[in-house]
Image (cartoon, rainbow, N blue to C red):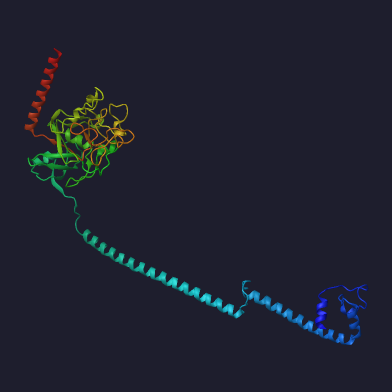
Amino acid sequence: NVTLFFSLSFIQIFATRENCCILDERFGNFCPTTCGVADFITRYHSDVNRDLQNLELLLGDISNSSGVTDNLIRHIRQVHTSQPAAQSNVIPGYTQKSRQIIDEIVRYENIILGHENTIQQLTDILILNSNKIQLLKQKTAQLEAQCQQPCKDTVQIQELTGRDCQDIANKGARQSGLYFIKPLKAKQQFLVYCEIDNLGNGWTVLQRRLDGSEDFNRNWIQYKEGFGHLSPNDNTEFWLGNEKIHLITTQTTVPYALRIELEDWNNQKSYADYAHFKLGNEADKFRLTYAFFFGGEAGDAFDGFDFGEDPSDKFFTSHNGIQFSTHDNDNDKYEGNCAQQDGSGWWMNKCHAAHLNGKYYQGGVYSEKDAGPNGFDNGIIWVTWHNRWYSMKKTVKATMNINPLCACILCKMSELLNFEHIVYNKTAGS
């Protein structure tokens, strides 16, 4: 009966006088769907009432149990994270909490391991730094011990001094090296490299090129003061400085000789000597002058060279009487800037037949393409020995004060050359 009642009640047919023979108000708005059932209920009214009362009590108990269950479910949901819908079995709350505790323990163990690794790394760094500190303390102790002693120059500078290297050689110096000199008009002494040969001649080295380690693309002030480094064994590149060269070569009436030493990439050597060499002061733009080419297998490139491109080649590539030029102080005869296009300072005419401050080319041979966008011959060249597209491996530019006897001979030779020049001009004129 109870089963039948529940199955019929879920159909939810609302009872009216038209669809039910007898309507029992105790059924509320729900009633059986046939009059036969109504007759049955009427016939067994007392039994049905008793059963209904029992059902009401049962439904009340169920309703109370459902409320408690709802409250319990809400409490579980608040306390515990719900499991994914895909799980078919619901894990009890204490099992889930235990699993969470285990996960926390594993996480803390991983954190502890990470901290232990960090501590080990920091310990290693601490040990390394401690060792470095110990080494620094030892080094400090060594330096403090050295500071207790008087300072000494690590570069050996010879004790003799003089007006120039020839003056030093005349005083008895026989060893090439670094010396202090003080020309007569110099305000203070300065360091030079003296090359003293077996004959007792003292050459003051003005310039050296040997490996391309020094950049010769410098401005006017740098060429005036000098740049590069002097070394006791003369194995560094440098330019002594135009002001120093001027002071050396103009301090006495006794003339100076200029020697140009060259070496190519086949290790062949040559030289060129010039007599009565001197450099003017800065007001005259350090003008280069000499009396005549004295000799040397390298030839007289300072006198200019006929490249066969223009009849005036030789005249406009000579260097005697030419002022010094740099990229920021143009004193050449060219409408452009020779020093700027060739990348170095030199006694530029229009432009040159000799250029010892040019760009250093490994191997010697170079081309217009190698010279860059200008395409000019910008190597270390001396065209009377090698052509303009061959750059020297090593060069030395040195000067020497000539002793009185040699000076007298050179003066006589100069007078003789001038006499021959006058005779030739008169003969050619007649």
> Residue 271, image x and y in percent?
14, 35
For residue 243, side relative to residue 170 (left or right): right
Front residue of this view, candidates 212 and 307: 307
Question: Which residue does the image show at 9% across and 39% down from the upper left?
Answer: 201
Write down the quadrant of residue 287 in the picture.
top left
> Image quadrant for the C terminus?
top left
Most distant residue in the top direction: 430
Q: Residue at x 7, y 42 (%)?
A: 198
**In this view of the protein, which residue sits in the foreground, 61 or 207?**
61
Can you tell which quarter of the image residue 138 is in?
Answer: bottom left
Q: Quadrant of the N terminus?
A: bottom right
Spot occupied by residue 428 in the image (x, y as percentages of width and height): 14, 15
Q: Position of residue 47 (x, y in %)?
A: 87, 87
Viewer-proximal residue among 67 and 417? 67
- In the depicted structure, whether residue 149 falls above or below residue 385: below
Q: Position of residue 371 (x, y in %)?
A: 30, 36
Q: Considering only vertical position in the picture, is 145 above or below 250?
A: below
Q: Is residue 316 left or right of residue 410?
A: right
The quadrant where residue 255 appears: top left
Q: Is residue 202 left or right of residue 90?
A: left
Q: How many marks?
A: 0
